[in-house]
Image: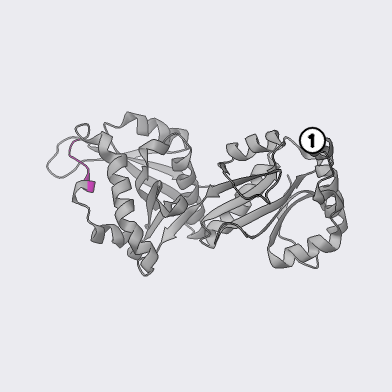
Amino acid sequence: MSTLLRPDAHYPHWPDLAAMIRDSFAYMTPLLGQPPRATTLTADALRRAATTGTAFVLSEADRPVACLFTRPSRDVPGALYLGWLAVAPTHRGRGLTRRLFNAAEHHAIAHNVPALTLDTGQRLTDLHALFMRLGFTALPTSDPTSGDVARFIKPLPRRLSANDPTDRTMLPDVLALMHRAFAPMDGVIDPPSSLARMTLASLAQPAVESELWVIAPSDQPIACVTLTPKADTLYIGKLATDPARQRSGLARRLIALAEVRARALNLPSLSLQTRVELTANHATFRALGFAQTGATAHPGYDRPTSLTFTKPLP
């Protein structure tokens, strides 16, 4: 198992890392028609890059086998740019790229960064497919200086603050998103969803008392969730995805965020409730590692109306 490092300027293996990157990028030369810039990287250049951003390196037997560097994006305000993704040819197909991207994403979320960006050659379609599997979408560009470059972006969950005027202006759109997402439940669940009674003031409460997270490319929310710390669990509420963006992995990403937050809060599990009638949701949560651990009834009902699902965290 490789070890994840964040090397600083004193990292002793910069020359080995530079050589690994050069080897990793060498296959692109015939595809691009010229050697990529990474094939001329030096140890000093990498060392400088690690002081202006964050480097993630995977090592085995004290030797670097994969890496990813980050810095502030020059094209998307507030975003984090990912560069110099490299995996040693001998270590491809082992999931190292996903581990590096997950590390960068967790780092970005911890700093409330709204998106990750990256670029690659237009002809490197294998990489395009990889990035899209990892949740990125292609960015259209009319920049005449972009040349043979394909750009990608991945919006990240963002925690809204009730004290931030910009975040407060997003609350009406978040409430509208919830209504769109929960509309198919009308006439299906009994009693009706408490969302019908939610106001902007009550929606703002999670931003004050717990956590309200959104995924909002271009400041338009397409998914959201509330996270409430309890005695021995992090409770997941109002998980909503825009109907036009369902089945695109957004809910899975918010559940993954909940795991990160639970670990940061030293809570051993995730929990949520879903209505008895929503059997498709039950199957989804089971597929995400949850198991049913209880059932409750709303006031005035003599039968279970909600099921509790829990996911222990390793």
Residue tagged by mark 1? 31
Dominant secondary-structure state across the stretch colored magenta:
loop
Residue at (84, 63) in percent of width and height: 44
Considering every residue shown, the one lying at the far front of the view is 144
Q: Could you say which is closer to the camera, residue 279 or residue 199?
A: 199
**Residue 191, magenta (yes or no):** yes
Q: Is residue 284 above or below residue 66?
A: above
Considering every residue shown, the one lying at the far bottom of the view is 163
Q: Is residue 282 above or below residue 215?
A: above
Q: Position of residue 219 (x, y in %)?
A: 42, 55
Considering every residue shown, the one lying at the far left of the view is 300
Residue at (51, 53) in percent of width and height: 260
Q: Position of residue 88 (x, y in %)?
A: 80, 43
Left or right: residue 314 compared with residue 100: left
**Residue 187, magenta (yes or no):** no
Name the image quarter holding residue 35: top right
Looking at the image, can residue 268 be seen?
no
Asked which secondary structure carries label 1, the reply is helix
Q: Could you say which is closer to the camera, residue 87 or residue 209?
A: 87
Q: Position of residue 240 (x, y in %)?
A: 36, 44
Left or right: residue 35 compared with residue 223: right
- Color encoding of the figure: one colour
Q: Could you say which is closer to the camera, residue 62 or residue 14?
A: 14
Q: Please name the amino acid that badge 1 sits on.
A: Leu
How crowded pointer 1 is (Cα within 10 Å; few <14, some 14-19, many 20+) is rated as few
Name the image quarter holding residue 227: bottom left
Q: Position of residue 252 (x, y in %)?
A: 47, 41
The residues colored magenta run: 190-195
Name the quarter where the N terminus is drawn.
Answer: top right
Q: Could you say which is closer to the camera, residue 245 or residue 121?
A: 121
Looking at the image, can residue 148 be seen?
yes
